[in-house]
Image (cartoon, rainbow, N blue to C red):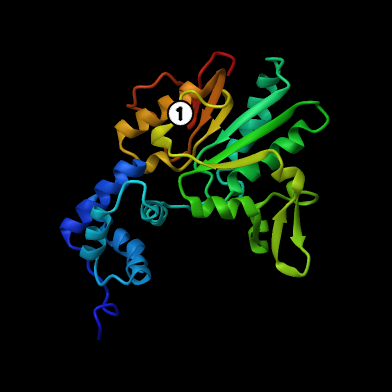
Amino acid sequence: MSALLKPAVMAQQDFEFFRARIFSLAGISLSEAKLDLLQSRLRPRLLATGLSNFREYRKFLEEIENDHDEWEIFTNLLTTNKTDWFREIEHFTYLTEEFLPRWKKLGKKHLTVWCAASSTGEEPYTLSLVLEQALHGTGITFEIQASDIDTKVLNQARNGVYDVMRLSQVPDKYKNGFLVGTGDISNWMKVKKKIKAPVTFSQVNLTKIPYRWKQPYDLVMCRNVLIYFNQDTIRQVVEGFYQVGCPDSVLIIAHSESLQNIKTSWKYIKPSIYSKGKIF
């Protein structure tokens, strides 16, 4: 059996290099227990590049420049992109029943949202579905800046086309008029134009958030991402969110995440929800 057909095994030296690089590139902190994960994620890249083992791939990465396209591929391979429609639905209930009624008292007519780590788009499109229905007829407009570090999933998100079997994740009241079949391809559905229109996708590295952004945000949603960071990186990322938030902005993280023991200016509201100002 040729070397290319043998399952590649990652040496400790290679593992240390790969996990140090993904930490420096994206802030992702991988423990010793993640060696098998790295092997399974990077092994297909060996075949694609014609390299025989992880040592050769490490040597290749050591020799290329920091702006080489391979680093984007490397980062995409080691980024986790699990997501669903209406994931942790309690957060969307909070938005409609608590956040929006209080936000409207500010007298604003345009709501700005940053959906960080948006993956393949289900989360920002869920936000758009919810906001479209909740704000319909109020004269209030909204826009959602969706971002991810993974360029591959961003391209999927921009397409807005999904397996129709995923429609079961969407509550009935949101299905009609928002998600439609793609015509001849009955196994797929696409997001309607009025739901896609307020959403813009861009690549953003959360460990390098520009403090002077396009605009301040009323709401920042970043869920199921902080679990991949160590405490120092979490502190850096949430401080970035704080800097780009409006004076009364709200931050929503996942139920499995917490800012406990993290030095932050965000004020705790309830589990997974934090505020910058006093109104919330």
* Any part of residue 127 in sight: no
Residue 189 x, y percent position in the rendering: 71, 60
Residue 270 x, y percent position in the rendering: 50, 27
- Per the image, the residue denoted by label 1 is 210
Which residue appears at 73% of the width and 69% of the height?
A: 185
Which residue appears at 38% of the width and 42% of the height?
A: 227
Number of on-image labels: 1
- Residue furthest to the bottom in view is 1
Placement of 151 over or under 209, stated as above or below: below
* Residue 176 located left or right of residue 189: right
* Any part of residue 23 in sight: yes
Residue 109 x, y percent position in the rendering: 73, 21
Rendered image quadrant of residue 115: top right
Rendered image quadrant of residue 11: bottom left
* Residue 206 located left or right of residue 55: right
* Residue 232 located left or right of residue 73: left
User: Which quadrant of the rendered structure holds the C terminus?
Assistant: top right
